Amino acid sequence: MRVKLDIMEQEEMAWSAFADILPTCETLGDAQEKAHKLMKERNLEEYIEENIIDETVTEYWNERWSKYI
């Protein structure tokens, strides 16, 4: 159980780091690419499915841009 909690904590930290990177992304594809790279760098790609990463990035992207529409 401890391992799962550690992974969940690492994932939360990775998404927090991604939120800091998001404003530098010019397109949704760019954001998804950077998120995948970040998850790989943090050794989380084997725990988070690619489609989940893409869906989560899309949610972050839409939330960010909804402020300007």
Image (spheres, rainbow, N blue to C red):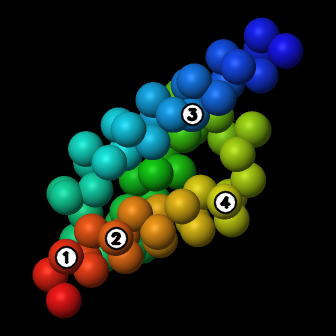
Q: Is residue 48 above or below residue 28?
A: above
Q: Amino acid at mark 4?
A: Ile
Q: Is residue 61 above or below residue 48?
A: below
Disc 3 or disc 1, which is closer to the eye?
1
Q: Earlier in the sequence, mark 4 or mark 2?
A: 4
| Residue drawn at point x = 70 percent, y = 19 percent | 5
User: How far apart are labels 4 and 1 at the CA level?
Assistant: 23 Å
Disc 4 or disc 2, which is closer to the eye?
2
Q: Where, quadrant-wise, is the N terminus in this rendering? A: top right
> Does the image show residue 35?
yes
Please name the residue that numbered disc 1 is placed on: 67
- The single residue placed furthest to the right in the displayed view is 1
User: How far apart are labels 4 and 3 at the CA level?
Assistant: 12 Å
| Residue drawn at point x = 45 percent, y = 42 percent | 15
Residue 53 sits in quarter: bottom right
Q: Earlier in the sequence, mark 4 or mark 1?
A: 4
Q: Amino acid at mark 2?
A: Glu
Query: Depth check: 36 or 11 in front?
Result: 11
Q: At numbered mark 4, what does the secondary structure look like: helix, strand or loop?
A: helix
Q: Amino acid at mark 3?
A: Glu
Please name the residue that numbered disc 2 is placed on: 63
**Residue 56 at x, y = what percent?**
54, 61
**Is 32 on the left or on the right of 11, as rendered?**
left
Confirm or deny contact between disc 4 and disc 3 (CB under 8 A): no
Few, some or many residues within 10 Å of mark 4 (<14, 14–19, 20+):
few
| Residue drawn at point x = 25 percent, y = 77 percent | 65
Name the disc covering residue 52, or none.
4
Please name the residue that numbered disc 3 is placed on: 11
Q: Where, quadrant-wise, is the C terminus in this rendering? A: bottom left
